[in-house]
Image: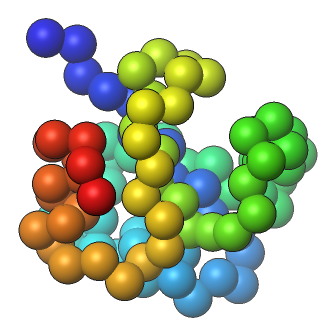
Amino acid sequence: MKRDRLVLVTGPGCPGCIQMKDRLQKLGLYDDIILMDIGTDRGKEFAMQYNIKSIPLLIKEDAPGTIRDILRGANHTDAAIKGFITAGGN
């Protein structure tokens, strides 16, 4: 079975982004995540392309550019984060 691509959209000086990164590290999931920092040119392009207005966002893609689901914000339980990643729901 093909694994989904996970993208964490973050930004400089974002407390929620730091919180989400720490949670993903604690859960052992951080190494599976592609970071997209909106403070970089690449991140700015990504945010414009997908009309991203708030961060952090954990995006699940079927393939690059094909978004299947989005987990918004950082205030989620460990179970909710794991459930999003494994089952695609939030």
Image location of residue 17, percent across then percent down: 53, 75
Tell me the residue at 51%/31% (across/down): 67
Q: Position of residue 56 (x, y in %)?
A: 56, 68
Instruction: Tell me if residue 28 can be seen.
Output: no
Looking at this view, is 1 or 41 the one in front? Answer: 1
Res 77 → quadrant: bottom left
In the rendered structure, the answer to whether residue 49 lies left or right of residue 30 reads: right
Specify whether 35 is left or right of 14.
Answer: left
Q: Residue at x 24, y 22 (%)?
A: 3
What scheme was used to colour the molecule? rainbow
Give the quarter of the figure containing the N terminus.
Answer: top left
Quarter of the rendering occupied by the C terminus: bottom left
The residue furthest top is 1
Looking at this view, is 61 or 42 the one in front?
A: 61
User: How many labels, in total?
Assistant: 0
- Which residue reaches farthest front? 89
Position above or below: 57 against 18: above
Q: Residue at x 41, y 70 (%)?
A: 21
In the image, residue 73 lies at what x, y percent?
49, 74
Q: Is residue 63 above or below residue 38?
A: above
25 relative to 86 in the view: left or right: right
- Which residue lies at the image location 63% right of the left edge and 49% below the top edge? 36
Q: Position of residue 85 (x, y in %)?
A: 24, 46
Residue 38 image-quadrant placement: bottom right
Q: Is residue 68 visible?
A: yes
Q: Is residue 60 left or right of residue 38?
A: left
User: Residue furthest toward the bottom?
Assistant: 15
